[in-house]
Image (tube, rainbow, N blue to C red):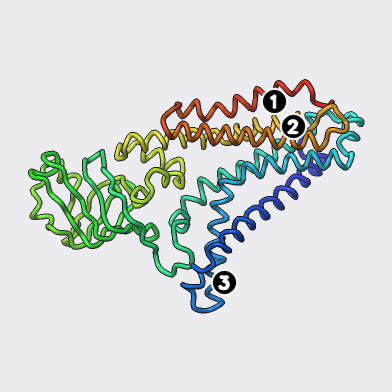
């Protein structure tokens, strides 16, 4: 029955509200941030045209990142507003009096919430990983922004990777230093330094790793073991060194949270590599559970909103709206709280991911008896 004139009417109402709320929310976030940081743009831009282009570019990418966070709550808020306007305009009682089943009204709107969450998932998987480096750039910066590099231990090879600054846009590490462990990779503990190192992504059969420009000491001066020669290789025809590693530039800057801007496939690859610490693996697994249950979580929350909004009390519109907003807020708070507990290792990731779903589904079932029919 989906696709009738009735469905198109409800879907159009929802899309209208959702688009307005999304634009308004993203615009509000951008304006507040711009008012607080306008000096960063003006100090780096010489002309008005350059200033406007820099502002537009920065807040375009910021809006894409903000939609990932705000898309779900805005989708639930839009559902509450649509049901409230239907009640306020006396359309809902007329529909029910005409014999339209309540479920017939709920299905298109809950489906719209699901579609909005699919847009959020597409943003997470397809857009954010491609623009992650842009989100780390300074406001109004004309060149790649350097961030203080964090020392990371590659647990798959035992190599300690550190440096002065990491540039996410160009995937380079300045004043790089790679400490090779002994006796697994070298006969004696050795340190390779290079003024510049660039991370090369894996392609096909070629593994990913760091390309060290003009390293010191040279490849011939390293007393590499057989295992070391499989990890540390000389670049053919040059004096450069290539160090195989799954530790990317992203992990050298805010490694405890930078994985949230990776796709699910990239996070799985990072877990399989065995190159990161167990604490980081725990956070990634918890984040994966939350991300993969994002759609059922918000669908369950939408099913909770419907019986709270469409109640038997005829004059209960504002109170029902308040109850629905409160319930959606509680569900969102449980989602965030469980995520924090999972990242801290207090509760398992799968339990944290399914707790909001169980809460919303149980509450929706409980309030179903009061729904108007």
Against 5, residue 241 (above or below) is below
Against 38, residue 244 (above or below) is above
The quarter holding residue 298 reads: top right
Against 133, residue 55 (above or below) is below
Question: Mark 3 packing: few (<14 Cα in 10 Å), some, or many (20+)?
Answer: some
Q: How many marks?
A: 3
At a point 70% along the width and 40% down the height, the residue shown is 112
Residue 51, x across and y down, in percent:
54, 73
Any part of residue 127 in sight: yes
Any part of residue 237 in sight: no
Element under label 1? helix
Left or right: where does residue 178 sit relative to residue 299? Answer: left
- CA gap between label 2 and label 1 equals 8 Å
**Residue sitting nearer the eye, 223 or 317:** 317
In the drawing, what numbered circle is on residue 364? 1
In the drawing, what numbered circle is on residue 352? none
The quarter holding residue 111 reads: top right
At a point 46% along the width and 47% down the height, the residue shown is 261
Q: Tell me whether circle 2 and circle 1 mark residues in contact (CB < 8 Å).
A: yes
Residue 168, x across and y down, in percent:
38, 57
Q: Residue furthest bottom?
A: 47
Residue 202, x across and y down, in percent:
33, 49
Q: Tell me whether circle 3 and circle 2 mark residues in contact (CB < 8 Å).
A: no
The quadrant in which the N terminus is found is top right
In the drawing, what numbered circle is on residue 52? 3
Residue 229, x across and y down, in percent:
15, 46
Q: Earlier in the sequence, mark 2 or mark 1?
A: 2
- CA gap between label 3 and label 2 equals 43 Å
At a point 64% along the width and 58% down the height, the residue shown is 27
The quadrant in which the C terminus is found is top right
Residue labelled with disc 2: 306
Q: Earlier in the sequence, mark 3 or mark 2?
A: 3
């Amino acid at each position: 029955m989906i696709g009738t004139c009735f469905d198109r009417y409800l879907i159009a109402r929802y899309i209208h509200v959702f688009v307005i709320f999304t634009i308004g929310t993203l615009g509000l976030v951008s304006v507040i941030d711009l008012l607080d940081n306008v000096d960063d743009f003006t100090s780096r831009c010489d002309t008005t045209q350059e200033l406007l282009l820099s502002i537009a570019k920065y807040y375009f990418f910021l809006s894409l990142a903000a939609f990932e966070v705000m898309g779900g709550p805005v989708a639930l808020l839009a559902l509450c507003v649509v049901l409230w306007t239907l009640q306020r305009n006396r359309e809902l009682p007329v529909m029910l009096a005409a014999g339209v089943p309540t479920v017939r009204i709920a299905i298109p709107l809950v489906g719209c919430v699901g579609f909005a969450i699919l847009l959020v998932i597409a943003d997470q998987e397809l857009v954010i990983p491609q623009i992650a480096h842009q989100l780390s750039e300074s406001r109004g910066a004309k060149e790649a922004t350097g961030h203080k590099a964090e020392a990371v231990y590659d647990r798959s090879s035992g190599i300690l990777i550190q440096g002065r600054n990491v540039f996410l846009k160009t995937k380079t590490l300045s004043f790089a230093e790679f400490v090779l462990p002994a006796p697994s990779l070298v006969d004696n503990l050795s340190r390779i330094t290079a003024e510049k190192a660039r991370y090369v992504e894996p392609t096909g059969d070629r593994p990913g790793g760091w390309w060290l420009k003009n390293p010191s000491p040279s490849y011939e001066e390293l007393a590499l073991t057989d295992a070391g020669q499989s990890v540390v290789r000389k670049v053919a025809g040059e004096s450069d060194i290539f160090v195989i590693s799954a530790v990317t530039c992203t992990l050298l800057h805010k490694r405890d949270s930078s994985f949230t801007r990776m796709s699910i496939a990239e996070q799985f690859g990072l877990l399989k590599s065995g190159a990161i610490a167990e604490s980081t693996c725990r956070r990634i697994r918890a984040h994966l559970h939350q991300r993969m249950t994002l759609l059922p979580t918000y669908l369950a929350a939408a099913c909770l909103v419907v019986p709270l909004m469409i109640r038997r009390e005829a004059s209960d519109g504002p109170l029902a709206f308040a109850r629905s907003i409160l319930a959606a807020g509680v569900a969102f708070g449980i989602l965030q709280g469980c995520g924090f507990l999972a990242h801290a290792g207090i509760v398992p990731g799968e339990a944290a991911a399914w707790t909001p779903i169980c809460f919303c589904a149980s509450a929706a079932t409980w309030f179903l008896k009061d729904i108007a029919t």
